[in-house]
Amino acid sequence: LVGSVSQSIRSMKVSSTSNWKFQCFNVYCQPIQTVTVMNIRQCQMACLSLEQCYTANFYRSTKRCDVFFEVLYRDGTLVGDNDTIVLA
């Protein structure tokens, strides 16, 4: 008898736009996760690792990745920011 291992592999097309970031309308809206990463690819992977992730901001100068929940995305907009790449 051989047991089976189930795996959940999440994939999606992630587009990136330089010099923009996601910003919530509500002052209480915060990222569901903030991590320090080496590059934008690691930020994409951080987003893909969370089922609830809908968008993320990658800050080039600090290597910070802010991950936002899908519901929060509906309560925000894109704003210009020369240091940021938004992933959606």
Image (cartoon, grey):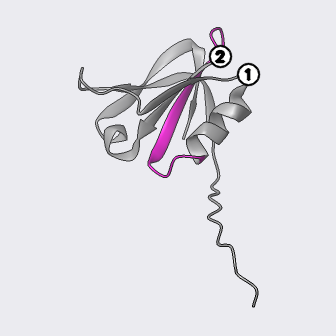
Magenta extent: 49-63
**Numbered disc 2: secondary structure:** loop
Residue at x-position 49% and y-position 38%: 55
Instruction: Give me the disc on residue 58.
Output: none
Instruction: Give me the disc on residue 38.
Output: 1
Q: Are marks 1 and 2 in contact (CB under 8 Å)?
A: yes
**x, y (%) of residue 80?**
49, 17
Tell whether 21 sits left or right of 45: left
Tell whether 81 sits left or right of 4: left
Tell whether 32 sits left or right of 1: left
**x, y (%) of residue 36?**
62, 20
In the image, residue 44 sits, relative to residue 39, either above or below, namely below
User: Who is closer to the viewer here, 32 or 81?
Assistant: 32
Furthest residue to the front?
Answer: 1
Q: How many marks?
A: 2
The amino acid sitting under disc 2 is Lys
Tell whether 42 sits left or right of 31: right
Residue at x-position 76% and y-position 86%: 2
Residue at x-position 73% and y-position 24%: 39
The amino acid sitting under disc 1 is Met
Residue at which label 2 appears: 63
**x, y (%) of residue 78?**
43, 27
Magenta-colored stretch includes residue 61: yes
**Numbered disc 1: secondary structure:** loop
- Characterize the local packing of mark 1: few (<14), some (14-19) or many (20 or more) Cα atoms within 10 angstroms: few
In the image, residue 62 sits, relative to residue 65, either above or below, namely above
In the image, residue 81 sits, relative to residue 71, either above or below, namely above
